[in-house]
Amino acid sequence: MADVISINLDPMKDGIIGKTDTVESTAGRYLVVGTNFDHRIISEKEFWAYLKAMEDAGVSHQAIMGEYLIFYDQSKVITVSGDDYLVGSFLLVKPSGDSNVFTHMSDEDIEGVKEDISGYFSELIINGERYDALAV
């Protein structure tokens, strides 16, 4: 595969030197977290697109978990003995204090986030199969 970027510490010759097919930014470190504890980092644009899609479908719901804010599809919630559980995935951000502004999370922070919210998880047995679920 040909080089796409060359850094030679020469501002006149550095930068993109090859064809870029896809480019994506992870600025802001928005997360999609699954109730199976997998996660992926998404761009700010993708975060807002997911949120808009949930709102347009009328299924958007949000909750505060410690110092984090999560957004999820309310139609994916299961009620068991009066308690609500989400099975699937959700968007997770760390508010900065300003409206619609979120704190940048490093890779180390992301692993800490998953540990911080682990207390909100329970195990459900659905049709004889065990699933991790998020108490919402």
Image: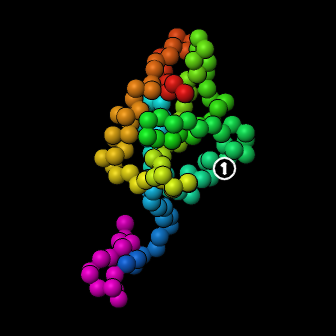
Left or right for 38, reference 76: left
Q: Is residue 2 magenta?
A: yes
Q: Is residue 5 magenta?
A: yes
Q: Is residue 120 visible?
A: yes
The C terminus lies in quadrant: top right
Give how far across and how far down residue 45 sits, in percent: 56, 58
Give how far across and how far down residue 103 sits, in percent: 43, 53
The N terminus lies in quadrant: bottom left
Assign a secondary structure to mark 1: helix
Q: Badge 1 is on which residue?
A: 52
- Residue appearing at x 62%, y 47% in the figure: 51
Above or below 99: residue 89: above
Q: Is residue 90 visible?
A: no
Q: How is the image coloured?
A: rainbow
The amino acid marked with disc number 1 is Lys
- Would you call the spot at circle 1 few (<14 residues within 10 Å), some (14-19), or many (20 or more)? few
Give how far across and how far down residue 12 sits, in percent: 35, 88
Single out the residue that lies furthest toward the bottom.
12
Single out the residue that lies furthest toward the left.
9
Q: Which residues are magenta?
A: 1-14
Single out the residue that lies furthest toward the front.
97
11, 29: nearer the viewer: 29
